[in-house]
Image: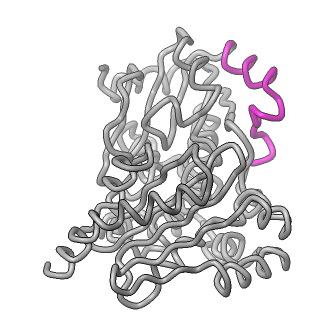
């Protein structure tokens, strides 16, 4: 593993082509960190290309540079061409190549040096360079740190700052999660001083819902939210038919699991969505309740202590039953948190 500082001559040297990719179904941090890095590299005189495995929510379309993004699922030829033609590969906001779906095998086989920048636990050893910190609030925070390490903070502008602010804001739950450190607030202050319009960002993320999405959310909260007060747990299941009935688009289920967690007394929450080929699961928790351990043990997932993802190849009904069975053994850890 090379020291990340060894990249300084590369970044400050002659123009090079950089391939930037992030995890499937990118969220605010994935897109914010990728496009923040994209604009930073452009200011250094390089030629970066951002490639995502698939699509992402329309609430992220406002990000500067978004129109330049290549989606592998819709244009694999252009994506592979960018990968083949690049000099270096940046892997952002994921710790395993399986998180980028079919792109993973191609990136693994690529001979160009790989640079992982990520904050998830237990990173896979596939990159020659790594900037990893599981205590970081967001990968966007690490892109900011990269600029600091390279002595390039003077290059910060409103475009880079808007992207990084979006990544940090979304991954900290608008600065309310435990990962929001004093250093994060100092970083945000610097981004504001660089010209970031935080009102515009919050409006784009939180106030751009379609009428149909709002109806869908109302239906889910009224009909699909299950509350288990004796287990201090709440969860939501959504069928494939319900996704069709409400014309659910990419990003429309974003944040739903947090409503389950917001119930007074709830320490653990889950959202199970039938995506036809797979049931995708989101877990959230409070305090010391280890959502990542539960996910890894029962649903082939992982993530952070209080935010994790998983999946199931079984039906939604069987997945829900497995979740409830696993919860019986997990309950003591939820209670243990109450005593701290």
- Residue in front for this viewpoint, 302 or 182: 302
For residue 47, which quarter of the picture?
A: top right
- Residue in front for this viewpoint, 181 or 299: 299
> In x, y percent, where is residue 205?
67, 70
> In x, y percent, where is residue 71?
76, 37
Q: Which residue corresponds to the image point at 69% horizontal and 51% vertical from the top-left?
A: 275
- Residue in front for this viewpoint, 183 or 76: 76
> In x, y percent, where is residue 332?
21, 70
Q: Quarter of the image containing the N terminus?
A: top left
Q: Quarter of the image containing the C terminus?
A: bottom left
Relative height, residue 39 to residue 162 (above, below): above
Q: Which residues are magenta?
A: 66-84
For residue 225, which quarter of the picture?
A: bottom right
Is residue 75 inside the magenta stretch? yes
> In x, y percent, where is residue 108?
52, 17
Q: Main secondary structure of the magenta part?
A: helix
Q: Which residue corresponds to the image point at 36% horizontal and 47% vertical from the top-left?
A: 296
The answer, for residue 90, to whether it is visible in the render is yes
The answer, for residue 153, to whether it is visible in the render is no
> Which color scheme is applied?
one colour
Q: Which residue corresponds to the image point at 71% horizontal and 63% vertical from the top-left?
A: 239
Relative height, residue 168 to residue 160 (above, below): below
Residue located farthest toward the bottom when viewing the structure as drawn: 264
Is residue 241 inside the magenta stretch? no
| Residue 57 shown left or right of residue 186 in the figure | right
- Residue in front for this viewpoint, 291 or 86: 291
């Amino acid at each position: 593993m090379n020291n990340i500082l060894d990249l300084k001559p590369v970044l400050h040297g002659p123009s090079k082509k950089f391939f930037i990719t992030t995890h499937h179904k990118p969220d605010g941090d994935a897109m914010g960190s990728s496009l923040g890095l994209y604009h930073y590299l452009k200011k250094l005189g390089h030629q970066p290309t951002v490639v995502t495995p698939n699509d992402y929510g329309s609430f992220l379309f406002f990000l500067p540079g978004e129109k330049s993004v290549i989606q592998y699922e819709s244009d694999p030829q252009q994506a592979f061409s960018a990968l083949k033609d690049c000099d270096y590969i940046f892997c952002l906001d994921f710790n395993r190549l399986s998180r980028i779906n079919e792109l993973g095998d191609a990136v693994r086989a690529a001979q160009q040096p790989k640079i992982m920048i990520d904050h998830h636990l237990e990173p896979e050893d596939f990159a020659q360079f790594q900037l990893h910190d599981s205590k970081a609030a967001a990968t966007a925070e690490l892109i900011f740190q990269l600029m600091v390490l390279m002595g390039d903070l003077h290059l910060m502008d409103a475009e880079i700052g808007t992207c990084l602010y979006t990544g940090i804001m979304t991954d900290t739950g608008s600065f309310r999660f435990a990962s929001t450190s004093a250093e994060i607030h100092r970083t945000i202050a610097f981004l504001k001083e660089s010209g970031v319009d935080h009102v515009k960002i919050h409006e784009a993320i939180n106030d751009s819902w379609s009428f149909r999405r709002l109806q869908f959310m109302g239906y889910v909260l009224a009909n699909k939210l299950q509350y288990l007060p004796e287990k201090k747990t709440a969860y939501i299941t959504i069928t494939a038919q319900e996704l069709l009935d409400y014309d659910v688009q990419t990003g429309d289920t974003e944040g739903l699991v947090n409503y389950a967690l917001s119930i007074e007394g709830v320490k653990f929450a889950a959202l199970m969505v039938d995506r036809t080929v797979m049931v995708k699961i989101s877990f959230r928790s409070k305090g010391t309740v280890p959502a990542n351990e539960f996910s890894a043990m029962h649903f082939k997932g992982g993530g952070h202590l209080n935010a994790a993802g998983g999946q199931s190849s079984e039906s939604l009904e069987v997945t829900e039953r497995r979740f409830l069975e696993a919860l019986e053994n997990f309950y003591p850890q939820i209670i243990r948190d109450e005593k701290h």
